[in-house]
């Protein structure tokens, strides 16, 4: 029947996993992803890196598995969501750098529209707020910021999309310009109820509909690979989904009503809410999780912009030698010596949605040592994630949620024990490091007929459980302290 490939566009790497007919990962490889920060608040990529990294990782993963492209039945893609790309379909060349989901260069445009009273309309239609995090302002900028973009728009050859749409376009040599509803739901340009582009929102942001990809079910045929670097033509792309939703799909299947926290460069904390969206007034965001042949599942999400990025900052500042040692260093301190660290390096996401907020440390004294700062930052990360988990539990009605964690920082035992203590529920950490790529491959396998749901139910990986050790009064006190600290950073 053939193996499945799952491609995962992460924040710092592109990963590919090879999944066998039995559902196990038999090959995996990662390629570093370029990222530039030309100015404060600007984060961009060379868009071709997503294509080159996907192919390089796929080649090496197949080689590790002792296979080649003729053994591949189908491909699934887990994309970066809000990262936005513009290109000319006539030449295939990009019209500007890819704008990362972390990019804040459109903040002033968002402020103008928000101050103009348009936020209510955007939330009513899309379920989202006006914020540079979402793709709408990025698409608007990409459609008009360069001579190449304006010329392509005038010719009708401008194309806009996420990392998925660009990869699909390049792998099919321009034959397919497509995406899925989970990806479009993160643009703030989609009607959340109809799951189609909103003409009102397109007009507000001056984004041409002709430049946008068609919206397909998550599990459907997105085109056949004809790229010259793939020696076998005709391999179908059978699934496309946002990376955070790919992992939630797997967790939700194994533990219905789970609250899932994927910890990477940032944190994306989600829970499935069924076939109808929940519009929250607490700053949580509703998205389409996945759409399988008319069976649409919505999710509710809260984000923390900096997790792995904040840990990398500790290393860059020389406070710890490597990210792997942060748990050991934090354990050297009995407490944080009065420090409170709010790691909002890229702004505050849920529930504040303030892109201008910045990280702060409170309580520093002459007693402060590097281990105190490391411990305080890990406490701040755990508190940030815990706040979103508790908000999701309250909004979704999950009274006794199962907290599932994955991603690189989830392998930090100090951080995970803190998270369990702050939320007051067990935290179950998967030991499969590439669950996002696995989710993309399994969705492709379902689409191609390689797997059934029963098959996937038997694929649950091993886990490590963290049990809370604090009492309710202590947790509630720490939560109030955290909310007070975070509110001090809000600029609007």
Image (cartoon, helix red, strand yellow):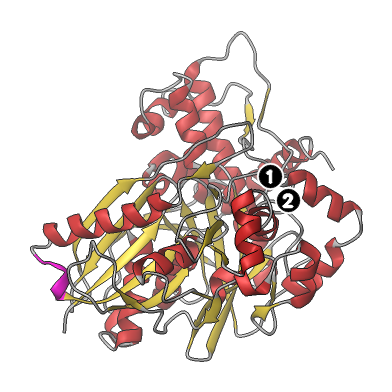
Residue located beneath label 2 in the image: 353
Mark 2 → mark 1, Cα distance in angstroms: 6 Å
Q: Secondary structure at mark 2?
A: loop
Q: Relative to 112, does residue 198 appear above or below in the rendering?
A: below
Q: Is residue 68 magenta?
A: yes
Task: From the top left corner, tell me how far across and down residue 249 is, in percent.
Answer: 44, 73
Q: Which residue bears the numbered disc 1? A: 348
Magenta residues span 67-71
**Labels 2 & 1 near each other (Cβ < 8 A):** yes
Q: Quadrant of the N terminus?
A: bottom left
| Furthest residue toward right | 116
Q: Does the magenta run of residues contain 132?
A: no
Residue drawn at (41%, 69%), measured in percent from left and top? 168
In the displayed structure, 225 sits above or below 389; it is: below
- Horizontal relation, residue 276 to residue 369: left or right: right
What is the residue that sits farthest to the bottom in this orientation?
294
Few, some or many residues within 10 Å of mark 2 (<14, 14–19, 20+):
many
Sequence-wise first label, 2 or 1? 1
Residue visible at 27% across and 83% down in the picture: 455
């Amino acid at each position: 029947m053939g193996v499945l490939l799952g491609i995962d566009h992460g924040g710092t790497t592109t990963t590919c996993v090879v999944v066998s007919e039995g559902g196990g990962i038999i090959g995996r490889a990662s390629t570093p992803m370029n990222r530039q920060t030309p100015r404060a608040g600007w984060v961009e990529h060379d868009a071709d890196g997503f294509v080159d990294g996907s192919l390089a990782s796929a080649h090496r993963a197949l080689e590790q598995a002792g296979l080649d492209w003729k053994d591949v039945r189908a491909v699934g893609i887990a994309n970066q969501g809000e990262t936005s790309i513009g290109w000319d379909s006539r030449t295939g060349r990009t019209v500007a750098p890819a704008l990362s989901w972390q990019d804040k260069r459109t903040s002033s445009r968002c402020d103008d529209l928000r101050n103009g009273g348009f936020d209510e309309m955007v939330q009513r239609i899309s379920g989202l707020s006006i914020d540079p995090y979402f793709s709408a302002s990025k698409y608007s900028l990409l459609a008009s910021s360069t001579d190449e973009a304006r010329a392509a728009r005038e010719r009708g050859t401008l194309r806009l999309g996420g990392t998925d749409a660009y990869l699909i376009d390049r792998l099919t040599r321009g034959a397919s310009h497509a995406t899925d509803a989970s990806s479009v739901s993160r643009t703030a340009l989609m009607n959340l109820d109809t799951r189609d582009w909103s003409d009102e929102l397109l007009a507000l942001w001056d984004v041409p509909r002709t430049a946008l990809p068609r919206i397909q079910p998550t599990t459907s045929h997105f085109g056949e690979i004809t790229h010259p670097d793939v020696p076998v033509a005709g391999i179908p792309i059978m699934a496309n989904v946002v990376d955070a939703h790919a992992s939630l799909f797997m967790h939700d299947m194994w533990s219905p009503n789970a609250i899932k926290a994927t910890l990477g460069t940032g944190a994306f904390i989600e829970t499935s809410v069924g076939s109808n969206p929940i519009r929250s007034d607490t700053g949580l965001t509703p998205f389409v999780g996945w759409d399988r042949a008319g069976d649409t599942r919505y999710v509710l999400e809260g984000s923390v912009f900096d997790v792995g990025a904040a840990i990398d900052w500790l290393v860059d500042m020389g406070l710890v030698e490597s990210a792997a040692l942060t748990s050991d260093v934090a354990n050297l301190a009995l407490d944080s010596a009065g420090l409170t660290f709010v790691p909002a390096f890229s702004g505050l996401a849920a529930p504040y949605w303030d892109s201008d907020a910045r990280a702060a440390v409170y309580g520093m004294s002459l007693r402060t040592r590097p281990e105190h700062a490391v411990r305080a930052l890990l406490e701040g990360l755990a508190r940030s994630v815990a706040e979103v988990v508790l908000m999701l539990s309250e909004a979704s009605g999950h009274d006794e949620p199962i907290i599932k964690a994955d991603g690189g920082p989830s392998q930090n035992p100090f951080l995970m024990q803190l998270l369990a203590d702050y939320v007051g529920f067990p935290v179950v950490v998967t030991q499969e490091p590439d669950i996002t790529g696995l989710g993309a491959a399994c969705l492709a396998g379902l689409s191609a007929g390689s797997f059934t749901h029963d098959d996937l139910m038997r694929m649950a990986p091993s886990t490590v459980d963290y049990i809370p050790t604090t009492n309710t009064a202590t947790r509630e006190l720490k939560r109030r302290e955290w909310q007070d600290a975070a509110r001090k950073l809000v600029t609007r």
